Image: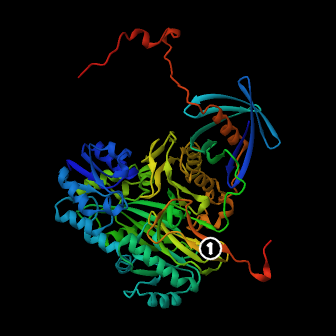
Amino acid sequence: MELHYEYGGEIYKVHLEQRSGNFKVRIGDKLYDVSMSRLGDGKMHIKANGLPFYSKIASSGQKRFIFLDGETYHLKRIIKPIPHDHVEGEILSPIGGKIIKIFVAEGDIVEENQDLLIVESMKMEYRVKAPFKATVMRVKHGEGTVMNTGEVLLDLERIYSDNQAEW
Amino acid sequence: MFEKVLVANRSEIAIRVLTACQEMGIKTVAVYSDVDANSPHVRFADEAYCLGDPAPTESYLNIEKIIAAAKETGVEAIHPGYGFLAENPLFSMRCEKEEIVFIGPRSRVIRLMGDKVRAKRTVEKAGVPVIPGYHGTDTSTETLIEEGRKLGFPLFIKAVLGGGGKGMRIVRREDELESSIESCKREALSAFGDSSLFLEKYLARPRHIEFQILGDRHKKVIHLFERECSIQRRHQKIIEETPSCALTSYLREKMGEAALRVAEAVGYTNAGTVEFMMDENKNFYFLEMNTRLQVEHPITEAVTGVDLVKWQFRLASGEHLTLRQDNLHQIGHAIECRIYAEDPTREFLPSTGRLHEVELPRGINVRHDSGIETGLEVTRHYDPLLSKLTVHAENRRESIEKMIWALSKYVILGVVTNVGFLKHILSNESFKSGEITTHFIEEHSKELFPKPKIPDEALIAAVLAETIDEPQAQVLKVSAENDPYSPWKTAGNWRNIPR
């Protein structure tokens, strides 16, 4: 079977084949002969092409948390690869928290890096800035609204200046 | 000594203080908000009192509720931990009025040191240098802009009642001054209930070095040496160590004396910390005094062998400070790392979620002050500090090696943490050679924030985990039959005795 994971904005394809207790794993053009012993609670001793390592895994929904050699990797399993996930002009909340200040109104033209609004979380202020020059199409929430991470705050429409069209 | 004490805090520091109480035979009361009902600190105390609504102002910051809890449970004293009400003079005054002992200095001293401008004036009078800046009483935006221009850039804007890295901005250019003043005012108002600001000259390549103080009610004050806390992000410390490799024994003595002068000038009692900034030429300046137990107190405990929290209780109950300055020594070297639920690659944004798995490193001279466990929910209501890892070894090099080892055994699955980032810092050559300043993270951002790479091993582990996803009962059978020496064979029939 072929599995897809997202990590650091990139999609990784991993091919897995089970063969009488052992596994063949292919990542890109690399092939691994893999065996494992399960230690319970998501802990595994794994041997890939003869090299042993230890890993511990937990999952929640499509999220995969992988502890390996002192580092923790946060992956997302992608069941059906979505071709175009992110809409360019959607400004998402970088953090769960409360909108305490909105600087712009619908119809405003904002410059790149201009402050759009401030989200407060754990008594710290996070300034959400415009990623590019744009028109504010929609302000989705008012001041005082509590947002979750990744919720859409604003819709922007990018403005391309005439003399330097971006390719 | 007190019979019964309430700990007005949560998470790791509540547990730290409760531990000291239990060791001393003091009965304990914990407080908690609704979302913390399942937190370890609640179970750790003899009694627990629910404060309700998780909003800090309705729970851990709510003076009325904490006082009501103290009266209802009949405690003699309240330990505030750090943060929340620890440096709120209204709270300590209220305790004094209600005849409940506040574990900390007198409210007059908290008020004085909490006003960063009055504190500077007092300290200057005692002959200790302070960082130049604007400390005037007029803190209107117009005046601050004018004074800021005079002082020159870069400069710091700070809240008069500030602390803990909040209500603080660095301004690098004149055109950022006005918006920074305004946002700083808002943050100061929401965090400290007062929007007054002052300005401070920005020191180039400074180190943050602080001295631990203990004082009794009989005018005796000692210091327990320094802690270097230069490694900071968002103006908050993340790695602390002692001794500081920037100090010679001569400088240590001079700074220790200055710290004692500060404490004596205000009649300081209980545990406190005098913070200094040190410039490239090793000139030191008073920054502020923290009138409470510090987050990073474990490293001082490691190298001096003194239990600071127990002393807080003894000093608050009026006992004499029997520690002698000339008997105190720094043995070996200690480092503390603060483990935060935050994403270093996304400007240290706090991360929330359920902790699916927590496995703490266990080792020789590894101390763990933790408020977390598997299954705990990290919410957005409070500070994202999860735990503190402290190691103690013979010297700085070994201490760094031990910390890198301990971090690499530290498993937290479910939220993003700074564990990997801390390891990058400790492994950095400049850090190892002791070339550190409060700008360390910005100056080394290239090495400290490598492009995220995932090794094939992690992907292999991920796919293998999918194959065992289906829940399988994993009952461990005790196979006594095969082991002739098993104690199960001779144990006979055990049964539960009904009470």
Q: Which residue is mark 1?
A: A130
- Colour scheme used in the picture? rainbow
Q: Quadrant of residue B67?
A: bottom left
Q: In this view of the protein, which residue sits in the foreground, B474 or A72?
A: B474
Q: Quadrant of residue B166?
A: bottom left
Q: Could you tell me which residue is drawn at 45 percent across and 57 percent down?
A: B380
Residue B337 spot, x, y in % from top left: 51, 53
Quadrant position of the N terminus of chain A in the picture = top right
| For residue B218, side relative to residue B32 (left or right) | left
Quadrant position of the C terminus of chain A in the picture = bottom right
Q: In this view of the protein, which residue sits in the foreground, B367 or A99?
A: A99
Q: In this view of the protein, which residue sits in the foreground, A120 or B321?
A: A120
Q: Could you tell me which residue is drawn at 72 percent across and 50 percent down?
A: A11
Chain of the residue under the numbered disc 1 shown in the image:
A
| For residue A166, side relative to residue A150 (left or right) | right
Residue type, numbered disc 1: Ala
Residue A128 spot, x, y in % from top left: 57, 70
Q: Is residue B468 visible?
A: yes
